[in-house]
Image (cartoon, rainbow, N blue to C red):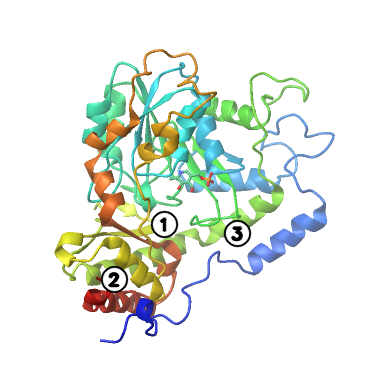
Amino acid sequence: MAQLAINGGSAVRQKGFSEWPVHGVEEREVLLEVLESGKWWRFAFGQGVALADPKDGPQSQVAQFQAEFARNHDCKYGIAAANGTATLEMALRALNLEIGDEVIVPAYTYIASATCVLQNNLVPIFVDVDRNTYNIDPDCIAQAITPRTRAIMVVHFGGQPADMDRIMALAQKHSLHVIEDAAHAHGCEWRGQKAGSFGIAGSFSFQASKNMTAGEGGILCTNDHELAQEVEALMWAGRRVGRPWYEFHRLGWNYRLTEFQAAILRAQLGRLAEQNQCRQANAKKLSAKLSQIEGLQPLVQDERTTCHGYHIYMFRYDESAIGLPRDKFVAALAAEGIPAMAGYTYPLYKNPMFLEKNFINGSFPLGTPYHDDIDYASFAKVCPVSERACNSEAVWIPQHVLLGGAEDIDDVVQAVDKVLAEKNSLL
Ligand SMILES: Cc1ncc(COP(=O)(O)O)c(C=O)c1O
């Protein structure tokens, strides 16, 4: 076989994959429309300064986007915000939990799934993920429940819904709230129901890499009227729907989305179903081919997952079977023009923030004596799957690689074959 690109040979893939973000005449027209309208934020000066009821007056881009996205995700209410970190934080804040209550969080996820807990003076308790899906493992949730547990943070990791049958049953049995971090799961479905609509709240991100994007942005979806009102108030500096402009009812922020972002997101939403279909079809082809290679195991698409967004396409890499460290494999694959990554370098609890408990004003969390003895390093003992995924096993391929044709998938497979055939040159 040819010399590896990392050793000076020529790369299998000479051009990029599908461009991301996708945009077209729809975005251009609507952006110009907003620009020229002079109405760049959601409310009308003068009349709309109190919280706008989306049913009132001319519909802003934000109000229309909220309604369209929520409807598309089996929810009655959508509250658009600046990003998916903010929507997670507000969802927990709106539940009015008590300082020091525990929230169960998967160890294998982005930092915001856990920092939203700390921002509310609650305690994140980490649990492991399922080796087949890298989603939160319901058995591990069951083992972590204590009398102080109040909520489960479910992350639909990589775009595959977590096992919502078992999670919702556990939540019901123990009277726990379920917050869905659906930052990766736009349009994804579990048994035909949209991710984000199972728990009390579903949070989505529109940051640049996400399957729908306006550069930044987020939305909180819910079927709970009271929670929707609370989140709207939190996002709008503590004001309340229908109350005067200069009346603040609770501690809030300004987390508002602009009209430009909402306009782009409405156009992006129009492409989502087709893009999800395309990613799923390509993922199926890729998995069929990679699963024939000894030492590689694509993550499983659960048969109850009726739509997988493949925000991240993932496979497991068996270092001992292959005889080449995962990180060398990934670097060689990247040099062949395939944007592969090893993903997270360690589970969340191994970040300095947790090891040093460097949280709010050095206190953990403010005002609770009971959790001082938590040693976040010790979560490694109960999270072997997350540890292994980070240390040696997980390989990620970003969603846009799956937005092209069959030849793109062939190039990924050819590059993998090439690297594995020449692995000795990397040792
Ligand atoms: C799992 C997960 N949750 C939450 C977020 C936070 O979203 P944002 O970047 O919009 O704040 C992200 C984004 O990277 C994420 O990957």
SS for callout 3: helix
Q: Residue at x 32, y 62 (%)?
A: 327
Give the alpha-carbon distance from disc 3 to disc 2, as whole Å: 28 Å
Query: Given the image, on which type of amino acid does mark 1 rest?
Result: His
Location of mark 2 (residue)? 285
**Residue beneath label 1, please?**
311
**How many other residues sit within 10 Å of disc 1, few (<14), some (14-19) or many (≥20)?**
many
Query: Quarter of the image containing the C terminus?
Result: bottom left
- The image quadrant where one finds the N terminus is bottom left
Q: Position of residue 210 (x, y in %)?
A: 49, 55
Where residue 104 appears, as percent x and y from the top left, is 34, 30
- Which of the 4 image quadrants contains residue 37? bottom right
Q: Which mark is residue 267?
A: 3
Precedes in sequence: disc 1 or disc 3: 3
Locate residue 345 relative to residue 62 in the image: left or right. left
As helix, strand or loop, the secondary structure at mark 1 comes to loop
Tell me if residue 413 can be seen. yes
Q: Nearer the viewer, mark 1 or mark 3?
A: 1
Judge by depth and name the residue closer to the eye, 390 or 251: 390
Identify which amino acid the numbered label 3 is placed on: Ala
> Quadrant location of residue 263?
bottom right
The mark total stands at 3
Left or right of residue 105: residue 218:
right
Q: For mark 2, does the 10 Å Cα neighbourhood hold few (<14), some (14 to 19), or many (20 or more) residues?
A: some
